[in-house]
Amino acid sequence: MPDRRRHPAVYAVSAVVVLSAGLLAVSCYQCRSMPRPTPPAGIPIVRVLVAEVRAGEAVSVSTTGPYEIHAAGSVVARSMASLGEGKLSRRSGQWRLHAADYPADELAVVAVGQSCVRVGSRAYRGKVVFTTAANGKILAVNHLDMESYLTGVLARELYRSWHIRAYQAQAIAARTYAFYEMGTFGRTHRYDLRADQSSQVYGGFLAETDKARRAVETTGGIVLATGPEGHEKVFKAYYSSCCGGMTNSAYVLSGPPVTSGPLAGGQKCEDCKASSRYRWPAVTVSKDIVYRALSRQYREVADLGGLKTIEVVEEAGASTRPVWINVVGTNGRKVRIRADDLRISLLRDGQTRGLYSMNCRIRDTGDAIVFDGGRGFGHGVGLCQWGAQGKALRGCSVQEILQAYYPGAKLFRAY
């Protein structure tokens, strides 16, 4: 679920989409068990970081059918048979795969025709480009068309049984988010998005479902945008699992306070009550665990000597959700961080379960920090997935669902 913390400029889109009754209608669809061929011209290519391997280690690579290997701008290997599983490693400026060495900065394994590229146990459409980071890690970046990417996202973000209109609303939100990241974060990085919850959860070809494909196809190229007439721009269309009854401002995640626009929050939502995370019981975490988790993410917290208490500095308006907190050390010093970073630090530490959002009260009980009165799952900004499902079941249209969570946003065709 989108949760990256940056606030870059957005960019414009063109041509307002007029949503006729048939544009988002559910049409008959024959399930395809194999990847689609080369995408039509005009659909953008998105770059997704699908794997990171520590320096000195190898990654398993293969294909399900015909392939090419590209290095240093040339095709260095080609076969109509599949590439058997092999270990790709990086040594002394060279890539090694199946006893062959390729002296290049990047190595690309390209799927030909109906083939897929496998990295570990997962299969991907398009091609996978292998490169190295400054710390020596091997990065595997899947390059594929936007619509295929979105199919692999929807299948991981939503339950298979959910309504097609919830899927279609999610498709438009996810496309908007990806389109935004391509034009901002992606301009200065080797990839546009990650395949996990720090961006959008993406499972590749094997995760795809017929319903996900149908939702992507029936909303093809449509994104959300906001701004004055004739100057609309794509925005970062956040979404989360369950808002817990009220959406939050994007301020809980990044940037200055947001008082207007589609990400200002404050929309009441009673359609997400079916979620088991709509309300959740108190979670108690020892101060030692909190301190250790935060110390791994913040060097300045490690210098506090230990955790004395957590102070709520600022809340998010009517929701009373903590936005900023002070981490108070046993040495008396304080470090100010966003409240949501506390939850993410605890999750990364792997010691805490049940802390589904920071939409809760924070209490100090002496040896522990208690999070109680919990509501929702995730950051609660933008589209509420359980709420979208509830609205779809009540008969709301795709446009009505999106307008409820991104008030004032308009639908545009980006390509």
Image (tube, rainbow, N blue to C red):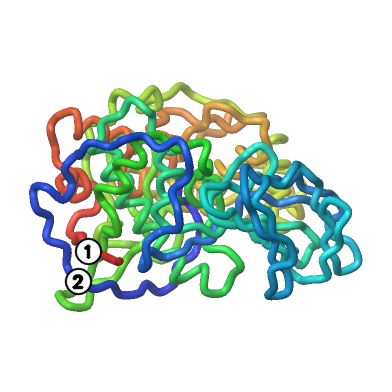
Which is nearer the eye, 231 or 52? Answer: 52
Which is nearer the eye, 341 or 25? Answer: 25
Where does the N terminus fall, quadrant-wise? Answer: top left
Q: Mark 1 points at which residue?
A: 412
Where 371 falls versus 345 (above or below)?
Answer: above
Residue 94 seen in the figure: yes
Where 303 falls versus 81 (above or below)?
Answer: below
Q: What element carries label 2?
A: loop
Callout 2 touching callout 1 (CB < 8 Å): yes
Horizontal relation, residue 87 to residue 412: left or right: right
Q: Mark 2 points at which residue?
A: 15
Horizontal relation, residue 400 to residue 314: left or right: left
Where 251 falls versus 8 (above or below)?
Answer: above
Q: In which quarter of the image is residue 368?
A: top right
Three-letter residue code for mark 2? Ala
Residue 400, position in %: x, y? 15, 45
Horizontal relation, residue 405 to residue 78: left or right: left
Residue that sits furthest to the left in the current view: 21
Residue that sits furthest to the front in the current view: 80
Residue under the image location 37 percent in, 51 percent down: 174
Residue 302, position in %: x, y? 75, 52
Q: Quadrant of residue 151?
A: top left
Give the mark, 2 or 1, whose residue is nearer the N terminus: 2
Q: Total label count? A: 2
Where 253 falls versus 413 (above or below)?
Answer: above
Residue under the image location 69 percent in, 59 percent down: 78
Residue under the image location 37 percent in, 56 percent down: 250
Three-letter residue code for mark 1? Phe
Which is nearer the eye, 35 or 360? Answer: 35
